[in-house]
Image (cartoon, rainbow, N blue to C red):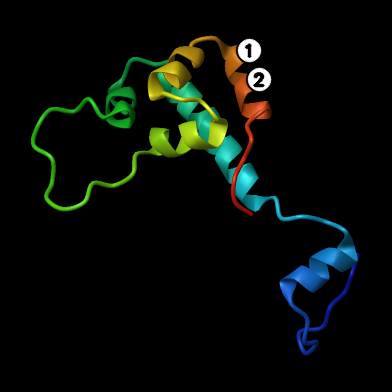
């Protein structure tokens, strides 16, 4: 294990090079989100309605927030949200899609 004192003037990138590792936190978070969404989509409850955006009522004013599913489809490389939702019913294909996701960011 590499020990770096707090008084050393090293950037995060320098420490990552010394340990020969990469940043993997965002990919780990996205994979867990994808597993959770797959779990929610297989159920027919309130969580499914909220996640897919099929709630009744008026939209709030201003710029709409980015939906979780929109961000996931861009990360997974699928073209449409409906393709991702139909894949979630088959657990094995959903797991394969998560494992082969292209991942963006650091």
> Which residue of the protein is positioned furthest toward the top in this rendering?
90
Residue at image point 56% right, 41% down: 30
Q: Residues within 10 Å of mark 1 (few under 14, many from 20)?
A: few
Circle count: 2
Q: Position of residue 95 (x, y in %)?
A: 63, 21
Residue furthest front as drawn = 79
Q: Which residue is mark 2?
A: 96
Residue at 28% in and 30% down:
50
Q: Which quarter of the rendered picture does the C terminus lie within?
A: bottom right
In the displayed structure image, the side of residue 94 where residue 19 appears, left or right: right
Mark seen at residue 92: 1
Q: Which quarter of the picture shows residue 57?
A: top left
Query: Horizontal and vertical percent for residue 93?
Result: 61, 13
Q: Disc 2 vs disc 1: Cβ atoms closer than 8 Å?
A: yes
Q: Give the camera-side residue of 95 and 104.
A: 104
Up-down relation of residue 63 to residue 86 (above or below): below
Residue 85 appears in which quarter of the rendering?
top left
In the image: residue 76, left or right of residue 56: right
Corner quadrant of residue 55: top left
Q: Position of residue 35 (x, y in %)?
A: 55, 29
Q: Residue at x 88, y 63 (%)?
A: 19
Q: Is residue 2 left or right of residue 97?
A: right
Question: Gap between marks 2 and 1, in whole Å?
Answer: 6 Å
Mark 2, residues whose alpha carbon is within 10 Å: few (<14), some, or many (≥20)? few
* Marking on residue 34: none
Q: Residue at x 59, y 51 (%)?
A: 105
Image location (x, y in percent) of residue 89: 48, 11
Q: Secondary structure at mark 2?
A: helix
In the rendered view, tell whether residue 99 sits above or below residue 12.
above
- Is residue 1 toward the left or the right of residue 45 in the image? right
């Amino acid at each position: 294990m590499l020990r770096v004192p707090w008084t050393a003037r090293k950037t995060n990138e320098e420490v990552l090079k010394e340990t020969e590792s990469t940043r993997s936190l965002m990919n780990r978070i996205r994979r867990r989100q994808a597993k959770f969404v797959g779990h929610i989509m297989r159920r027919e409850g309130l969580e499914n309605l909220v996640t897919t955006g099929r709630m009744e009522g008026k939209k709030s004013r201003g710029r709409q927030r980015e939906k979780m599913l929109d961000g996931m489809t861009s990360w997974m490389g699928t073209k449409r949200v409906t393709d991702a939702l139909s894949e979630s019913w088959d657990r094995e294909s959903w797991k394969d899609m998560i494992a082969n996701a292209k991942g963006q960011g650091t």
